[in-house]
Image: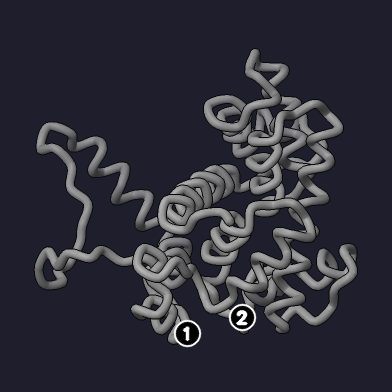
Amino acid sequence: PLEGTVAIGEQRSKAWAVHPAAPNLQRAADRFLDKNKRLVAILRGRYFKPSKFARSARSEIYRADRTGRISPFDEYFRAAGETTGIDWRLLAAVAYAESRFDPKAQSRFGARGLMQLLPGTAKRVGETDLFNPRKNVQAGAKYLQRLMKIFAKDGVEPRQQIRFALASYNCGLGHVLDARDLARKTGKNPNRWFGQVEEAMKLKEKPEWHRKTRFGYARSRETIAYVSRIQAQYDVFTRHVPLE
């Protein structure tokens, strides 16, 4: 929902470039794009073609750097934050990453609403009407809280609990527990995400490693990017919107 306040020129096409002395890198990038055209299309649609609702949410009314408002649903994020003890701006960052603040969003996997929850997940925390923005946000916050408590019982400090919970929210608790186990086996700190468990998480894309885990293969790099993206968005929100 944030945009720059300074115009830097007309819109232009964008492209990646590699150094002329790196032809192998160029060939590798071309092979990846050719092999993953469907994935690229999905990512482009999700992150570069926001919904009509999301475009309207970038209007001046919701400029966090000018109005102190993040989204049309701030009251729901605040209420859920009070209920669960989670910073409401973090909940807003999750919703932005998941749905671009579209309460009617629905993924091809069946996830619904602002926080993109599966019906089964929402039911476990006592909510069923996922297209109701208030109930959807409450369900997402309760689910994150439940995940954080699991890691708290294992001695993980609060900041890291959040990161592990976000990773679990994206790929499932089992995969994150697997990654923590792999971190222990590879000499990394199982209680820290960045640079530690996130590195172990990458091993779950490799057959020689994920075959040894309980939950098997995971799209690890997607989860790693997800946690970093929400962390970055949360940092933006905290700079512009004070916590009352």
Which residue is pictured at 79% across the width and 47% down the height?
Answer: 147
Crowding at label 1, few (<14), some or many (≥20) Cα neighbours within 10 Å? few
- In the displayed structure, does residue 101 sit left or right of residue 170? left
Tag 2 secondary structure: loop
Foreground residue, 233 or 21?
233
Placement of 148 over or under 233, stated as above or below: above
Which residue is pictured at 31% across the width and 66% down the height?
Answer: 3
The image position of residue 57, as x and y in percent, is 44, 79
Foreground residue, 36 or 2?
2
The image position of residue 91, as x and y in percent, is 62, 59
- In the displayed structure, does residue 196 sit left or right of residue 18? right
Most distant residue in the front direction: 244
Q: How many marks?
A: 2
- In the displayed structure, does residue 98 sit left or right of residue 49? right
Which residue is pictured at 42% across the width and 51% down the height?
Answer: 239
User: Can residue 1 be seen?
Assistant: no
Please, what is the three-letter code of the amino acid marked with disc 1? Phe
Please, what is the three-letter code of the amino acid marked with disc 2? Pro
The first of marks 2 and 1 along the sequence is 1
Residue beneath label 1, please? 53
Which quadrant of the rendered structure holds the N terminus? bottom left
Tag 1 secondary structure: helix
Find residue 93 and name its label: none
Foreground residue, 36 or 133?
133
Placement of 163 over or under 126, stated as above or below: above
Residue beneath label 2, please? 103
